[in-house]
Image (cartoon, helix red, strand yellow):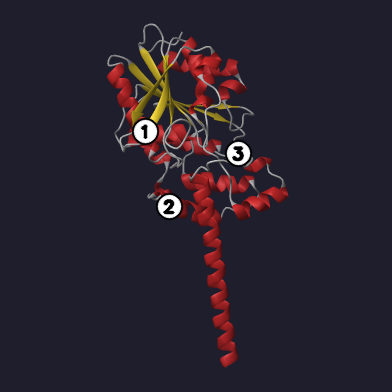
Amino acid sequence: MRSHLQRFKNLVVLIVLIGLAFNGVVFYHAYRMTHYSKAGRRTDRPEDLSRLRKTMVLVSGVTIPKPRNRQSPQDFNLPFQSFELDSTDGVRLHGWRIETREPKDIMIFFHGYAAAKDTMLGVAQYWYAKGWTCLVLDFRGSGDSQGRVTTLGVREALDVSAVWGWARDHYPKARLVGYGDSMGGVAMMNAIHEGFIKPHAVIAEKPFARMLDTIRNRFRAMHVPGFPSANLLTFWGGVQLGYNGFRHNPVVYATAIECPTLLLHGENDPRVTVEAVRSIKHAIGTNATLHVFQGAKHESLLDYDLAQYETVTSNWFARNVNVQTD
Protein backbone atom coordinates (compact mmCIF):
# COMPACT_ATOMS: atom_id res chain seq x y z
CA MET A 1 0.00 0.00 0.00
CA ARG A 2 2.78 2.41 0.94
CA SER A 3 4.69 1.66 -2.26
CA HIS A 4 1.62 2.50 -4.37
CA LEU A 5 1.13 5.74 -2.45
CA GLN A 6 4.78 6.65 -2.87
CA ARG A 7 4.59 6.00 -6.60
CA PHE A 8 1.54 8.21 -6.85
CA LYS A 9 3.32 11.00 -4.94
CA ASN A 10 6.35 10.67 -7.19
CA LEU A 11 4.12 10.87 -10.26
CA VAL A 12 2.42 14.01 -8.95
CA VAL A 13 5.79 15.62 -8.21
CA LEU A 14 7.02 14.69 -11.70
CA ILE A 15 3.92 16.18 -13.34
CA VAL A 16 4.28 19.38 -11.30
CA LEU A 17 7.97 19.69 -12.20
CA ILE A 18 7.26 19.14 -15.89
CA GLY A 19 4.47 21.73 -15.74
CA LEU A 20 6.72 24.26 -14.02
CA ALA A 21 9.54 23.64 -16.50
CA PHE A 22 7.17 23.99 -19.47
CA ASN A 23 5.69 27.21 -18.11
CA GLY A 24 9.20 28.51 -17.49
CA VAL A 25 10.15 27.90 -21.13
CA VAL A 26 6.95 29.58 -22.37
CA PHE A 27 7.48 32.52 -19.99
CA TYR A 28 10.96 32.99 -21.45
CA HIS A 29 9.60 32.75 -25.00
CA ALA A 30 7.05 35.48 -24.25
CA TYR A 31 9.79 37.72 -22.88
CA ARG A 32 12.01 37.21 -25.93
CA MET A 33 9.14 38.02 -28.30
CA THR A 34 8.27 41.30 -26.62
CA HIS A 35 11.65 42.52 -25.35
CA TYR A 36 14.01 43.33 -28.20
CA SER A 37 17.66 42.47 -27.58
CA LYS A 38 20.50 44.98 -27.78
CA ALA A 39 22.34 42.95 -30.41
CA GLY A 40 22.49 39.58 -32.13
CA ARG A 41 21.30 37.98 -35.34
CA ARG A 42 17.55 38.00 -35.79
CA THR A 43 15.87 34.60 -35.86
CA ASP A 44 14.48 33.71 -39.28
CA ARG A 45 10.75 33.60 -39.92
CA PRO A 46 9.09 30.41 -38.57
CA GLU A 47 8.31 29.12 -42.07
CA ASP A 48 11.97 29.58 -43.12
CA LEU A 49 13.55 27.63 -40.26
CA SER A 50 15.09 24.19 -40.75
CA ARG A 51 13.82 21.32 -38.59
CA LEU A 52 16.91 21.48 -36.37
CA ARG A 53 16.68 25.25 -36.04
CA LYS A 54 12.99 25.04 -35.16
CA THR A 55 13.84 22.64 -32.34
CA MET A 56 16.52 24.99 -31.06
CA VAL A 57 14.19 27.99 -31.19
CA LEU A 58 11.46 26.08 -29.34
CA VAL A 59 13.95 25.57 -26.51
CA SER A 60 15.86 28.85 -26.50
CA GLY A 61 13.29 31.32 -27.84
CA VAL A 62 13.63 33.84 -30.64
CA THR A 63 16.24 36.57 -30.93
CA ILE A 64 14.93 39.91 -32.17
CA PRO A 65 17.37 42.82 -31.95
CA LYS A 66 15.77 46.23 -31.58
CA PRO A 67 14.55 47.17 -35.08
CA ARG A 68 16.64 49.95 -36.59
CA ASN A 69 16.01 52.30 -39.49
CA ARG A 70 18.32 51.20 -42.29
CA GLN A 71 16.98 53.80 -44.73
CA SER A 72 15.68 57.36 -44.57
CA PRO A 73 13.28 59.33 -46.79
CA GLN A 74 16.36 60.72 -48.52
CA ASP A 75 16.98 57.25 -49.98
CA PHE A 76 13.54 57.52 -51.62
CA ASN A 77 14.15 61.06 -52.90
CA LEU A 78 11.65 62.44 -50.42
CA PRO A 79 12.00 65.82 -48.68
CA PHE A 80 11.67 65.36 -44.94
CA GLN A 81 12.14 66.71 -41.47
CA SER A 82 12.61 64.67 -38.32
CA PHE A 83 10.38 65.38 -35.34
CA GLU A 84 10.09 64.13 -31.78
CA LEU A 85 7.22 64.01 -29.33
CA ASP A 86 6.25 62.31 -26.10
CA SER A 87 3.63 59.59 -26.04
CA THR A 88 0.80 60.12 -23.60
CA ASP A 89 2.65 58.04 -20.98
CA GLY A 90 5.96 59.85 -21.46
CA VAL A 91 7.79 57.57 -23.90
CA ARG A 92 9.90 59.61 -26.34
CA LEU A 93 8.94 58.96 -29.96
CA HIS A 94 10.62 59.81 -33.25
CA GLY A 95 9.06 60.42 -36.64
CA TRP A 96 9.59 61.77 -40.14
CA ARG A 97 7.48 64.48 -41.73
CA ILE A 98 7.34 64.30 -45.54
CA GLU A 99 5.45 67.44 -46.43
CA THR A 100 3.91 68.61 -49.70
CA ARG A 101 3.96 72.31 -50.63
CA GLU A 102 0.31 72.80 -49.68
CA PRO A 103 -0.50 70.17 -47.06
CA LYS A 104 -4.25 69.56 -47.12
CA ASP A 105 -4.62 65.86 -46.51
CA ILE A 106 -2.35 64.03 -44.06
CA MET A 107 -1.65 60.31 -44.02
CA ILE A 108 -0.06 58.89 -40.87
CA PHE A 109 1.83 55.60 -41.18
CA PHE A 110 2.28 52.94 -38.48
CA HIS A 111 4.68 50.02 -38.95
CA GLY A 112 4.32 46.38 -37.97
CA TYR A 113 5.77 44.11 -35.30
CA ALA A 114 9.57 43.85 -35.04
CA ALA A 115 9.96 46.60 -37.63
CA ALA A 116 10.82 50.30 -37.75
CA LYS A 117 9.35 53.22 -39.62
CA ASP A 118 11.66 52.82 -42.61
CA THR A 119 9.59 49.79 -43.65
CA MET A 120 6.76 52.23 -44.45
CA LEU A 121 8.81 54.46 -46.75
CA GLY A 122 7.84 52.66 -49.95
CA VAL A 123 4.14 53.13 -49.37
CA ALA A 124 4.72 56.68 -48.08
CA GLN A 125 6.57 57.49 -51.29
CA TYR A 126 3.57 56.24 -53.27
CA TRP A 127 1.09 58.43 -51.38
CA TYR A 128 3.38 61.46 -51.37
CA ALA A 129 3.41 61.27 -55.18
CA LYS A 130 -0.40 61.34 -54.99
CA GLY A 131 -0.28 64.66 -53.15
CA TRP A 132 -0.35 63.58 -49.50
CA THR A 133 1.73 64.93 -46.66
CA CYS A 134 3.04 61.84 -44.87
CA LEU A 135 3.94 61.36 -41.22
CA VAL A 136 5.87 58.17 -40.44
CA LEU A 137 6.31 57.14 -36.79
CA ASP A 138 8.56 54.77 -34.89
CA PHE A 139 6.53 53.00 -32.21
CA ARG A 140 7.94 52.73 -28.71
CA GLY A 141 10.77 50.22 -28.55
CA SER A 142 11.54 50.49 -32.27
CA GLY A 143 13.83 52.52 -34.50
CA ASP A 144 14.76 55.90 -33.05
CA SER A 145 12.05 55.87 -30.39
CA GLN A 146 12.72 55.16 -26.72
CA GLY A 147 12.86 51.69 -25.21
CA ARG A 148 13.20 48.08 -26.36
CA VAL A 149 9.75 46.68 -25.48
CA THR A 150 6.75 46.13 -27.72
CA THR A 151 3.22 45.51 -26.41
CA LEU A 152 1.94 44.25 -29.78
CA GLY A 153 -0.49 47.10 -30.31
CA VAL A 154 -1.74 47.72 -26.77
CA ARG A 155 0.30 50.67 -25.50
CA GLU A 156 1.23 51.53 -29.06
CA ALA A 157 -2.30 52.95 -29.19
CA LEU A 158 -0.95 55.71 -26.93
CA ASP A 159 1.70 56.43 -29.56
CA VAL A 160 -1.00 56.64 -32.22
CA SER A 161 -2.89 59.07 -30.02
CA ALA A 162 0.20 61.22 -29.46
CA VAL A 163 1.16 61.62 -33.10
CA TRP A 164 -2.48 62.18 -34.01
CA GLY A 165 -2.61 65.08 -31.58
CA TRP A 166 0.70 66.39 -32.93
CA ALA A 167 -0.69 66.29 -36.46
CA ARG A 168 -3.89 68.01 -35.39
CA ASP A 169 -1.87 70.80 -33.75
CA HIS A 170 0.34 71.32 -36.81
CA TYR A 171 -2.38 70.87 -39.45
CA PRO A 172 -5.61 72.03 -37.77
CA LYS A 173 -7.62 72.18 -41.01
CA ALA A 174 -6.32 68.98 -42.59
CA ARG A 175 -8.14 65.70 -42.90
CA LEU A 176 -6.23 62.88 -41.21
CA VAL A 177 -6.12 59.36 -42.61
CA GLY A 178 -4.39 56.48 -40.81
CA TYR A 179 -2.41 53.74 -42.55
CA GLY A 180 -1.32 50.75 -40.48
CA ASP A 181 0.65 47.66 -41.41
CA SER A 182 -0.12 44.53 -39.40
CA MET A 183 0.45 45.54 -35.74
CA GLY A 184 0.31 49.18 -36.85
CA GLY A 185 -3.26 48.67 -38.02
CA VAL A 186 -4.11 46.95 -34.74
CA ALA A 187 -2.69 49.83 -32.68
CA MET A 188 -4.73 52.27 -34.74
CA MET A 189 -7.94 50.26 -34.23
CA ASN A 190 -7.20 50.11 -30.51
CA ALA A 191 -6.75 53.90 -30.42
CA ILE A 192 -10.12 54.35 -32.16
CA HIS A 193 -11.79 51.94 -29.74
CA GLU A 194 -10.36 53.81 -26.76
CA GLY A 195 -11.65 57.10 -28.17
CA PHE A 196 -8.17 58.55 -28.66
CA ILE A 197 -8.58 59.38 -32.36
CA LYS A 198 -11.31 59.92 -34.95
CA PRO A 199 -9.80 59.39 -38.40
CA HIS A 200 -11.34 60.64 -41.60
CA ALA A 201 -10.53 57.20 -43.06
CA VAL A 202 -8.40 54.13 -42.30
CA ILE A 203 -6.32 51.74 -44.40
CA ALA A 204 -5.10 48.60 -42.65
CA GLU A 205 -2.88 45.94 -44.22
CA LYS A 206 -2.80 42.46 -42.73
CA PRO A 207 -4.27 43.25 -39.25
CA PHE A 208 -4.73 40.29 -36.92
CA ALA A 209 -8.16 39.74 -35.36
CA ARG A 210 -7.23 38.02 -32.08
CA MET A 211 -3.91 37.84 -30.26
CA LEU A 212 -4.36 34.16 -29.37
CA ASP A 213 -5.09 33.13 -32.96
CA THR A 214 -2.05 35.00 -34.24
CA ILE A 215 0.24 33.20 -31.80
CA ARG A 216 -1.36 29.88 -32.76
CA ASN A 217 -0.54 30.64 -36.39
CA ARG A 218 3.13 31.12 -35.50
CA PHE A 219 3.23 27.68 -33.90
CA ARG A 220 1.39 26.26 -36.90
CA ALA A 221 4.05 27.73 -39.19
CA MET A 222 6.61 25.74 -37.20
CA HIS A 223 4.43 22.59 -37.42
CA VAL A 224 3.97 22.57 -33.66
CA PRO A 225 0.55 22.13 -31.96
CA GLY A 226 -0.85 25.48 -30.84
CA PHE A 227 -2.42 24.13 -27.65
CA PRO A 228 -1.46 24.66 -24.89
CA SER A 229 1.66 26.61 -25.91
CA ALA A 230 -0.16 29.49 -27.61
CA ASN A 231 -2.58 29.87 -24.71
CA LEU A 232 0.25 29.96 -22.18
CA LEU A 233 2.29 32.35 -24.31
CA THR A 234 -0.71 34.68 -24.54
CA PHE A 235 -1.20 34.47 -20.78
CA TRP A 236 2.43 34.97 -19.71
CA GLY A 237 3.05 37.66 -22.31
CA GLY A 238 0.11 39.60 -20.92
CA VAL A 239 1.32 39.12 -17.35
CA GLN A 240 4.77 40.46 -18.24
CA LEU A 241 3.36 43.49 -20.06
CA GLY A 242 0.54 44.23 -17.65
CA TYR A 243 -2.56 43.44 -19.71
CA ASN A 244 -4.89 40.54 -20.52
CA GLY A 245 -3.60 39.04 -23.75
CA PHE A 246 -6.85 37.17 -24.33
CA ARG A 247 -8.69 40.50 -24.54
CA HIS A 248 -6.28 42.01 -27.07
CA ASN A 249 -8.67 41.47 -29.96
CA PRO A 250 -8.87 43.95 -32.86
CA VAL A 251 -12.10 42.30 -33.97
CA VAL A 252 -13.57 43.90 -30.83
CA TYR A 253 -11.79 47.20 -31.40
CA ALA A 254 -13.22 47.27 -34.91
CA THR A 255 -16.78 47.64 -33.62
CA ALA A 256 -15.95 51.26 -32.72
CA ILE A 257 -14.78 52.22 -36.23
CA GLU A 258 -17.27 54.49 -37.95
CA CYS A 259 -15.15 55.92 -40.79
CA PRO A 260 -14.52 54.39 -44.23
CA THR A 261 -12.03 51.56 -43.81
CA LEU A 262 -10.05 49.66 -46.43
CA LEU A 263 -8.67 46.29 -45.39
CA LEU A 264 -5.92 44.84 -47.59
CA HIS A 265 -4.77 41.26 -47.19
CA GLY A 266 -2.79 38.48 -48.85
CA GLU A 267 -4.53 35.24 -49.78
CA ASN A 268 -1.64 33.05 -48.57
CA ASP A 269 -0.64 35.02 -45.47
CA PRO A 270 0.73 32.43 -42.97
CA ARG A 271 0.42 34.79 -40.00
CA VAL A 272 -3.16 36.05 -40.40
CA THR A 273 -5.91 34.14 -42.18
CA VAL A 274 -8.32 35.71 -44.65
CA GLU A 275 -11.14 34.59 -42.34
CA ALA A 276 -9.62 36.63 -39.51
CA VAL A 277 -9.62 39.81 -41.59
CA ARG A 278 -13.15 39.04 -42.77
CA SER A 279 -14.20 38.97 -39.11
CA ILE A 280 -12.78 42.50 -38.71
CA LYS A 281 -14.70 43.61 -41.80
CA HIS A 282 -17.88 42.13 -40.37
CA ALA A 283 -17.28 43.90 -37.03
CA ILE A 284 -16.89 47.27 -38.76
CA GLY A 285 -19.94 46.76 -40.94
CA THR A 286 -20.92 48.65 -44.06
CA ASN A 287 -18.06 51.16 -43.70
CA ALA A 288 -15.50 48.43 -44.41
CA THR A 289 -14.14 47.20 -47.72
CA LEU A 290 -11.89 44.13 -47.95
CA HIS A 291 -9.63 43.34 -50.89
CA VAL A 292 -7.61 40.11 -50.99
CA PHE A 293 -4.49 39.93 -53.16
CA GLN A 294 -4.43 36.47 -54.70
CA GLY A 295 -1.22 34.60 -53.96
CA ALA A 296 0.25 37.26 -51.65
CA LYS A 297 1.77 36.36 -48.29
CA HIS A 298 2.59 38.52 -45.23
CA GLU A 299 4.36 41.18 -47.28
CA SER A 300 4.01 44.67 -48.69
CA LEU A 301 0.99 44.47 -50.97
CA LEU A 302 2.11 47.56 -52.86
CA ASP A 303 5.38 45.80 -53.72
CA TYR A 304 3.53 42.56 -54.50
CA ASP A 305 1.30 44.08 -57.18
CA LEU A 306 1.59 47.83 -57.72
CA ALA A 307 -1.02 47.98 -60.50
CA GLN A 308 -3.61 46.12 -58.44
CA TYR A 309 -2.80 48.19 -55.36
CA GLU A 310 -3.27 51.43 -57.30
CA THR A 311 -6.58 50.33 -58.81
CA VAL A 312 -8.01 49.14 -55.50
CA THR A 313 -6.99 52.16 -53.44
CA SER A 314 -7.93 54.73 -56.09
CA ASN A 315 -11.38 53.21 -56.61
CA TRP A 316 -11.96 52.99 -52.87
CA PHE A 317 -11.05 56.63 -52.29
CA ALA A 318 -13.24 57.71 -55.19
CA ARG A 319 -16.25 55.85 -53.75
CA ASN A 320 -15.77 56.44 -50.03
CA VAL A 321 -13.50 59.33 -49.14
CA ASN A 322 -13.68 62.96 -50.17
CA VAL A 323 -9.95 63.66 -50.24
CA GLN A 324 -7.39 64.33 -52.94
CA THR A 325 -5.82 61.16 -54.34
CA ASP A 326 -4.02 62.34 -57.47
Measure how far apart labels 2 and 1 are at the Cα level.
21 Å
For the point 55% across and 38% down, the residue is 273
In this rendering, the answer to whether 106 lies above or below 19 is above
Quadrant position of residue 311? top right
The residue type indicated by label 1 comes to Arg
Q: Secondary structure at mark 3?
A: loop
Q: Position of residue 225 (x, y in %)?
A: 61, 54
In this rendering, the answer to whether 151 lies above or below 281 is below
* Mark 2 surroundings: few (<14), some (14-19) or many (≥20) residues within 10 A: some
Q: In the rendered structure, which disc, 3 or 1, sits on the residue that comes first in sequence?
A: 1
| Closest to the observer, 28 or 281 | 28
The residue singled out by tag 2 in the image is: 240
Label ID, residue 92 = 1
**Is 319 placed left or right of 77 in the picture?**
left
For the point 52% across and 54% down, the residue is 28
Q: Are marks 2 and 1 in contact (CB under 8 Å)?
A: no
For the point 67% across and 53% down, the residue is 55
| Closest to the observer, 146 or 21 | 146
Q: Position of residue 204 (x, y in %)?
A: 46, 28
Q: Is residue 105 visible?
A: yes
Q: In the rendered structure, which disc, 2 or 1, sits on the residue that comes first in sequence?
A: 1
Q: In the rendered structure, which disc, 2 or 3, sits on the residue that comes first in sequence?
A: 2
The residue singled out by tag 3 in the image is: 270
* Mark 1 surroundings: few (<14), some (14-19) or many (≥20) residues within 10 A: some
